[in-house]
């Protein structure tokens, strides 16, 4: 279970980061489980989004699939759990409960921080190796090649990449991911590369 840090309008609801462990507490997990059970989902992964408000957790979305946004990589870094492998095992009818129940945290915190580019035609990306060298950074992904045109940041597909970082705590992992993200610079121009 992760917390989703989101963008302000006009990109309302677009994830800027997934942060583990969640601050939501046990009630959120109970609500997510009840939502999946109410839909009859018994085998395989579920992806459930909740909004935590004054009235407690409320279900926004339930899907019978793994989460996107590098959720599987985050689970591997945080807990040593291979969500993709478990999903395949479930699809093949193999037992997954023992593997999932014996997960031991590999870190005190883990974060996927998404990279938001400036508008324009991508010329080059700088600082990738420096970002990878930040302590706790597990992975840096850049989604676009030079020549890609970045428009206004409105939806998840407008993100330019992601940093996965771990730390001794949630806060340390977030600080490390943010430091790495600051080092990555998307150089853009007004004209496309030909």
Image (tube, grey):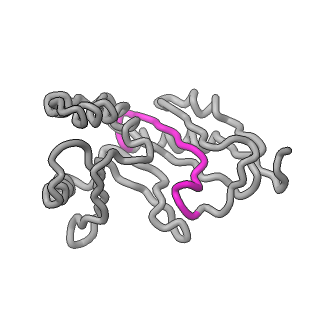
25 drawn magenta: no
Q: Is residue 51 left or right of residue 56?
A: right
Q: Is residue 37 left or right of residue 153?
A: left
Q: How many numbered circles does the render carry? A: 0
Quadrant for the C terminus in the image: top right
Q: Residue drawn at (65%, 43%), measured in percent from left and top?
A: 144
Q: Is residue 179 visible?
A: yes
Q: Quadrant of residue 81?
A: top left
The percent position of residue 187, horizontal first and vertical second, equals 75, 46
Of residues 43 and 110, the one drawn nearer to the viewer in this rendering: 43
157 drawn magenta: yes
Q: Is residue 102 visible?
A: no
In the rendered image, the vertical position of residue 123 relative to residue 77, given as above or below: below
Q: Residue drawn at (37%, 31%), measured in percent from left and top?
A: 77
In the rendered image, the vertical position of residue 90 relative to residue 114, given as above or below: above
Give the magenta part as a residue range: 154-170
Q: Residue furthest front?
A: 92
Of residues 113 and 143, the one drawn nearer to the viewer in this rendering: 143
The percent position of residue 7, horizontal first and vertical second, equals 50, 62
Q: Residue drawn at (41%, 34%), measured in percent from left and top?
A: 166
């Amino acid at each position: 279970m992760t917390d989703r840090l989101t963008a302000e309008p006009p990109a309302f609801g677009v994830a800027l980061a997934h942060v583990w462990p969640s601050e939501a507490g046990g009630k959120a997990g109970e609500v997510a489980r009840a939502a999946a059970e109410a839909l009859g989902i018994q085998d395989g992964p579920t992806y459930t989004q909740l909004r935590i408000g004054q009235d407690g957790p409320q279900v926004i979305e339930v899907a019978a699939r793994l989460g996107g946004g590098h959720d599987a990589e985050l689970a591997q870094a945080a807990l040593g759990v291979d969500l993709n492998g478990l999903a395949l095992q479930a699809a093949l009818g193999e037992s997954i409960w023992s593997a999932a129940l014996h997960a031991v945290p590999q870190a005190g915190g883990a974060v996927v921080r998404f990279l938001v580019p400036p508008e324009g035609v991508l010329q080059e990306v700088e600082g990738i190796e420096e970002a990878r060298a930040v302590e706790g950074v597990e992975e840096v992904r850049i989604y676009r090649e030079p020549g890609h045109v970045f428009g206004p940041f409105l939806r998840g597909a407008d993100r330019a990449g992601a940093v996965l970082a771990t730390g001794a705590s949630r806060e340390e992992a977030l600080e490390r991911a943010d430091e790495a993200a600051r080092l990555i610079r998307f150089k853009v121009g007004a004209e496309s590369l030909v």
